[in-house]
Amino acid sequence: MMLANFLQRAIMQGIPLLYGSTGEIITEKSGNLNLGIPGIMYVGGISGVIGAFFYEQHAASLNPVLAVMIPLFCSILGSLLMGLIYSFLTVTLRANQNVTGLALTTFGVGVGNFFGGSLAKLAGSDIPSINLTQTSGFFRKQLFAAGDSGWFGQIFLSHSFLAYASIVISLVTAYVLSHTRIGLQLRAVGENPATADAAGINVGKYKYFATCIGSVTAGLGGLYYVMDYANGVWSNDGFGDRGWLAIALVIFAVWRPNFSILGSILFGGLYIVHMYIRNLDVSGQELFKMLPYVVTILFLIVISMRRKREAQPPAHLGQSYFREER
Amino acid sequence: MAAEPKQKGQIKEPLFHITKRDSIAWQKAWLIRIGAILFALVFSGIVSFLLTKENPLSIYATMLDGAFGTERRVWNLMQSLAMLLCVSVAVTPAFKMRFWNIGAEGQVLAGGLATAACMILFGNKLPSPLLLLVMLIVSIAAGAVWAVIPAFFRAHWQTNETLFTLMMNYIAIQLVSFFVYKWSVPKGSGQVGIINRATHAGWLPTLGKYEYLLNILIVLLVTVTMFVYLKYSKHGYEITVVGESENTARYIGIPVKKVIIRTMLISGAVCGIAGFLLVSGTDHTISRDTAGGRSFTAIMVSWLAKFNPIFMVLTSFLLAFLDKGASQVSTQLGLNKSFSDIITGIIIFFIIGCEFFIQYKVQFREKEAKAS
C-alpha cells in the first residue's frame, strides 16, 4: 500500500507544521506577526530533549507518565519563555515586530543547536550523541491499537497522542476564534486595537496571552518532531525550515486553524513527494523540494488578486499599539 | 491599564505612565544605546558563566582574541564585516520604503549562482577581465530578477512581500542544490569544490598580499554610493515618502508602483553584488550555505543603524565581532559554534529593547503630598 504509506508519512510531516501554524494563527489574530516561530519551535524541541535527557540520566527506571510529562512540561516552559521575550519587546517596549521576530529565530535556533551539540559535554557525561529512544518510545505509543487494521488504520489510527492533540488544539482554536466572546475580542484587537481599547478590551493583555499561547502551541510542534518523527534523536539543524513553512501555512489556511489541518497534510505530502517518484536522480529531488514554497507563492498571489475580505490578514498585523498615538 | 476609581473624588494614579518623546539629544540617545550594549555584555557574560562555568572576564578576553588576536583574524573579521555590510546596505532601500524584504538570502544566492555558472561555463574561454565583467553583470541581473518578482506583485496587487520574499529564499536554495548536484566534482558527491582551482579563472584578483582587500574596497564603495543615493538623490526622497505613507506619495504625484519596483531592483542588484563577492572573491565555490544566514543578520544590522549606511559600518562591526569572538570561545571550550548565535540574540534583544527608552519617556507617579 504505497498510497497509504505516503499519506501516513505526509500526516507525520504535517503535524509539526500544524502546531506551528496554529500557534502563529493565534498570535497573528492579536496583530503580532511573530517571525520567531522557527526559533520557538527549536526551543520547544530542545527544551523537551533537555528535560528527557536529565530524567533518563538520573532515574533508575523510567516511569511512563513522568517520561512524557517532564519533557512536555519543559517544552511548554521553554516556548513560554520565548513568547514572553517576544511579547515584552513588542507589546511593552513596542519594538519592531519583524526585527524582534528574526532575532528570536536566530536566538532560538542557536539555543537549539548549541544545547543539541553541547548538552552531553555540559552535563559531563561521555555519550557521543543524544539518543532518547526510551523516552521517544513512550511518546510514540500509538493511541489506538490499530496499526495493522488495513489502510484506514495505517493512515488515521497509527499516530501518537501528540498528533491527535494537534488536531484537537486546532479545532478548539478554530471554535474559540469564531464562536466565543474571547475569540471575538481577540480578533478585534488584531483588526483595530484602538477601537478595541475604546470598547474596554485590555489590548496588552490579549496580545500577551495570544502570543504566549501561540508560542507554546508552536513549541509542541518542535517536541513532536524530536520525540515522534526523529525517534528521540536530536540532530542539529534537523528541524530545518519547517518553521518557515508553518508560517507559509498560515496564509494557505487563510488564518483558519481548521483549514490548516488539511493544509498541513498537503504541505507534508509536498515535502516528501520526491521520495515516492521513481527514477528521480538527486538533483531532480532538489527541484521537487521547492514544491511547498512554489505552491505557497502561487496561493499568495491568488488571494491577493482576489481580494476577498475573509482571506486577508488581520488589519493591524505587524504594528505595535500605543494608546496615545492616534 | 485603566485606573480604577477607589472612592468618589479620589482617583488612583498608575505607578508610571509613558509619553512619546518629541526629540532626544543625540548624545543622550547614544548614551542609552551604549548603556544597553554594556548591559547586554554583562548579561551575556553571566549566561556564558552559567553555561560554561568559566570566568566571565576570561571569556571576554577570548572573544577579543578571537576577533583581533592575529593579523589573519583581523582580516577575517574585516572580510565578514564587509560581506555583512554589503547585504545590510542592500536591504536598506527596501526597508526605508517599509518593504519588508527578508529575501536577501535568496537574492544573494541567485547572484552567487550566476557567478558560479559563469565561472564554470566560461572559465577558460574568456579573457580574465572580460570574464569578471560578465560575471558581475550576470550576478547583478540575477539578484535583481529575484527581487523584482515579489516587488511586481506587491506593487500591483499588494501581495504580502514579507512572506513572498521568504518563500523565494527557499526556491533559490533548492535551485542552488539542484545545480550543485549537476556540477558536483567528483560526480554525485554533492559538492562543487573549488572552481577553477588551477587556473584561478574568474577569481577576484588579490591586491598585493591582502586577499580580501578588493572585496572590502568594493563594499565600501557600494556603501558610500548607497548613502549618497538615499540621502541626496530624488529617488532617495521618493523612497522616504513612500515609506512614510503611500497615500501621501500618491497624492504628491510619486509613481508608487514604479518606486517600489525600482527600489527592489536596486536592493536585489546589490544583493547580487554580494553574491558575486562571496563566490568570486571569497569562497570560490557555491553551496546552499553560501549566503550563510547573513541576510537575517543584515536586517538587524540595517534596522539598528536606523537605515543609515554609514552607521551600518558600526553595527555590522558589532555583529561580526560578536560572531568571531563567540566562535573563538566555543572552539576553545569545545562547545557548539551556535554559542555565537545565542550571544548575538541576547545583544540584539537588549538593543531592540533600549530603543523604547529613546522613543518614549517613562514618568513615575509623583509623591502623594506633591500631587495634591
Image (spheres, rainbow, N blue to C red):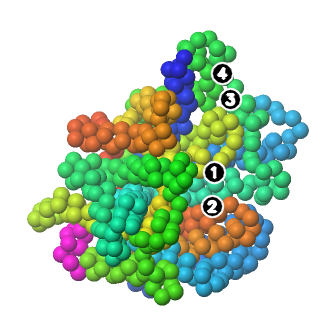
Instruction: Tell me which amino acid carries mark 3.
Output: Arg
Q: Do pointers 2 and 3 mark residues of a single chain?
A: no
Look at the image and give the residue range highlighted in magenta: B232-241
The residue sitting at 44% across, 66% down in the picture is B279
Instruction: Give the CA separation, mark 1 to mark 4.
Output: 29 Å
The nearer-to-camera label among 1 and 3 is 1
* Residues packed near mark 4 inside 10 Å, few (<14), some (14 to 19) or many (20 plus): some
- The crowd level at tag 2 (other Cα within 10 Å; few <14, some 14-19, many 20+) is many
What whole-number distance in Å separates the C-alpha atoms at marks 4 and 3?
Answer: 9 Å
Name the image quarter holding residue B273. bottom left
- Label 2 sits on a secondary structure element that is loop
Q: CA distance from mark 2 to mark 4?
A: 37 Å
What residue did someone put label 3 on? A140
Check disc 2 and give the amino acid type: Ser
Q: Please give the residue where the numbered disc 1 appears in the rendered image.
A: A236
State which tag comes first along the sequence, 1 or 3.
Answer: 3
Q: Is residue A26 left or right of residue B254?
A: right
Task: Name the amino acid, label 1.
Answer: Asn
The residue wearing badge 2 is B338
**Closer to the camera: disc 1 or disc 4?**
1
Residue B236 magenta-highlighted: yes
Dots 4 and 3 on the same chain: yes
Q: Picture coordinates of residue A219 (x, y %)?
A: 58, 43
